[in-house]
Amino acid sequence: MDDIKLFGAISIDTSILEKQGYKFNEGLLKQLRQFYESSVKLVQTDIVHQEAKKHISACVKEYKQKVESILRIAPNQIGISPEKVEDAKEFLSLNEDDSIIADKRLQEYYKQIGAELLETDKYVDVQRLMKMYFDVEAPFEDRKDKKNEFPDAIALISLEAWAEKNNVNVIAVSVDKGWEKYAETSKRIKCFNDLAEAIEELQPETQVERIVEIIHEKEILVNENHISDKIRQKIINVVENSFVDIETSSDYCYEETSCYMTYIDHEFKLNKENLIDIDVVMVEENIVTFQVNADIEFEVSVSFDFYIRDGIDHDDVGIGCTTREVKEEYNTDILISLSGNMDDDIDNINVDDIEVLSAVDCVDIGYVSPDSDYYGDERM
């Protein structure tokens, strides 16, 4: 397919929704609201909708089980009455079917972004579908379980037929290689595996180039200024307020007594020109939103108390403690919204919003044991 610059629609695969954590009210998925009632249509096939609903239902079930587990012990452990527990269950929709909750979330999101839900049975060409299957054409692959690719094939054939009927070119966003290979021979579909890059493709090209040029020329993200200061502070807040799971091993019984995260530094991902890689995802009058990627360096400090069980009294007897400090890195995308005239002095450009799209979730400390100069509860 030729390099098409004019697109009339965008469609997102389940793999991208999952990658974005189904966070419909933040991050890049929220940015799709800019196309509501615009010339760019958002199209979702019912196949992708059903897959997404299944995934979200599984997540809802998992988190409901965790909440219900806490609520079961609430009356005895923290003195909440059974009546209030039932009220909490109703308020949190714990008694509602998982699938219904998932469908409501998706339908509300479609309404926010103005998405059209495409009924694939009106567009799928069964004869073509079967030919693709037996000839092993993309998205089918020459493997034993190629039947699993039927949903992708149905979604892509329907999407292309809809594009032909409406005489538009479509951006399909998916990390699935089958989608990418299908798009390579499609007259109507171009595939992106990155949502930020796909959204950037829908922005006015000359404005995107100018914005990126200004950010680099003014060194907005590099030099010390109020914008870079706010970005750094936002990263610090995310890192140092993360709830982290600590993984460790020990030959002793132990208890984690404290955990502190400390930001050290961050570095933005660079492009081939050795400049910060920037994806512009929204351009409006005096408002610009763009995404960058960063490696965040931090230190985690964790303290442990160790004990043994007294064989006679069956009491826990302290045998010492230790503190471990480990330096780690994690990678995240960052969305930055600026307002004002980008050609103005940097002091006149305002920071409207900064979203660090992922936080530290787990750190492996390794093996831990009591410090050698500790015995019992007192230092020797």
Image: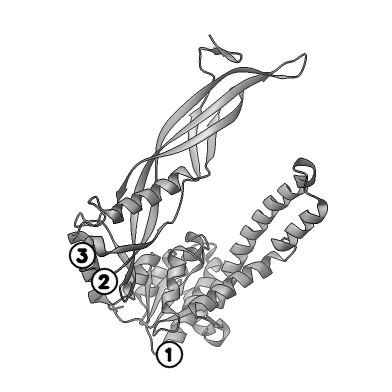
Crowd rating for badge 2 (residues with CA inside 10 Å; few <14, some 14–19, many 20+): many
Q: Farthest front residue?
A: 348
Name above or below for residue 305 compared with residue 335: above
Label number found at residue 208: 2
Label number found at residue 33: none
Crowd rating for badge 3 (residues with CA inside 10 Å; few <14, some 14–19, many 20+): some
In front of the other: label 1 or label 2?
2
Circle 3 residue: 214
Q: Distance between the residues labelled 2 and 3?
A: 10 Å
Q: Distance between the residues labelled 1 and 3?
A: 37 Å
Please name the residue shown 45% across and 38% down the image.
261
Crowd rating for badge 1 (residues with CA inside 10 Å; few <14, some 14–19, many 20+): few
Name above or below for residue 148 compared with residue 9: above
In the image, 5 versus 164, the foreground residue is 5
Image coordinates for residue 300, horizontal then vertical, percent: 45, 35
Image marks 1 and 3: residues in contact by CB distance under 8 Å: no
| 211 displayed left or right of 362 | left
Q: Which of marks 2 and 3 is nearer the N terminus?
A: 2
Image coordinates for residue 122, horizontal then vertical, percent: 55, 87
Q: Give, as a three-letter code, the residue at label 2.
A: Val
Q: Earlier in the sequence, mark 1 or mark 3?
A: 1
Which quadrant of the view contains residue 177? bottom left
Q: Is mark 2 on a helix, strand or loop?
A: helix
Image coordinates for residue 368, horizontal then vertical, percent: 52, 25
